[in-house]
Image: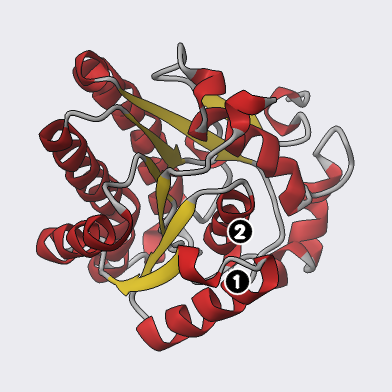
Amino acid sequence: MTSFDLHGRTALVTGGFSGLGLHFAEVLLGQGANVALIGRRIELGRNVAHALGAKLGRPAHVRAYQADVTDSASVADAFAHTSGHFGVPTIVVNNAGTVIRAPSVDVKDEDWASVVDVNLSGVFKVAQAAARALIKAGTPGSIINIASILGLRVRPSVASYAATKAAVVQLTKALALEWAEHGIRVNALAPGYFETEINREMLRSPVGQAIVARVPQQRVGQLAELDGPLLLLASDASSYMTGSVIAVDGGHLVNTL
C-alpha cells in the first residue's frame, strides 16, 4: 500500500544502536525513510549506521548522532544535527529505555532515579524537542512512544520500569491531546516479551520460561512482528489515530487471572 511508503521522510530513533531501536531503524530505512540513530555510545552508533546502510544499500540515508535523552540540550543538539543533514524529523521513535530488576524493598534511590530519568523524563524531553521542531517548521509529524505491557499490568521486581511505562501511556495521551492542533500525532506501542540483549538472560531462565508459559500464543514475539504496527503509526495509514496505545503481545494482556 502506498500509504506505508516513507520515501522522502526523516525518522529519528532513540536507543537506536541496539535492540528494538536498531530493528525499528532498519524497518524505517527499508521503507524509504532517512534515519537518524540516536544514542550515547557514538562509536558503536557509527559502526551500526555504517553496517545498516551497507546492508540495505542506502549508506547515505542513515547516520548516527550522540545524545543523552536525560539531557535536554543534548537532545536538542541531536535534532538540530539531524535537521541540518536530512531535514526535520517527521517520524520520531521514542525508544530509549532501561530496567533494573530487584525487589522493591532493595531498590536504591539512585537506581529508581536512573530508570525514571530515562524511561519517563527522557521520553518527554525527546517528544518535546520533536514537537518544538515540527511546530517551528509548520510540519505535521508522528511521535511513537515505546511503552510496554508492563505499563498496563504488572509483575514483581520491576516496579520502577512498570511505573514509568504506565506513565508513558498516560503521557502519550496527554501530548496527543495538546499537539493534535499542530498536526502532530502521538501514539504508543506496548510490546510484550521480545527477546533482545536487555532481557535475553531473563527470558531463558526458569523465571522467564514461566512468563512465556502465560502467553496465550505460548512463545515470545519475533521482532518482525512489530514491523506492521510500527509502520502503521509511522505512516499516513494512521492519519486519524492519535493517543492510541497498541499492544503487541501474543495475547498476554488478556490471559486468565
Q: In the rendered image, is residue 35 in sight?
A: yes
Residue at image location 21% in from the left, 36% down from the top: 134
Neighbor class of circle 1 (other Cα within 10 Å; few <14, some 14-19, many 20+) is: many
Residue underneath mark 2: 26
Q: Nearer the viewer, residue 79 or 171?
A: 79
Residue 207 is left or right of residue 70, and the answer is right
Amino acid on which disc 2 is placed? Glu
Tell me residue 169's x, y (percent).
40, 30
In the image, is residue 114 above or below residue 123?
A: below
Q: Which of 13 and 236 is in front in this view?
A: 236
Q: Which of marks 2 and 1 is nearer the N terminus?
A: 2
Tell me residue 25's x, y (percent).
54, 57
Residue 251 is left or right of residue 132, and the answer is right
Residue underneath mark 1: 52
Q: Residue 94 carries which label?
A: none
Q: In the rendered image, is residue 100 in sight?
A: no
In which quarter of the view is residue 243 placed? top left
Tell me residue 27's x, y (percent).
63, 51
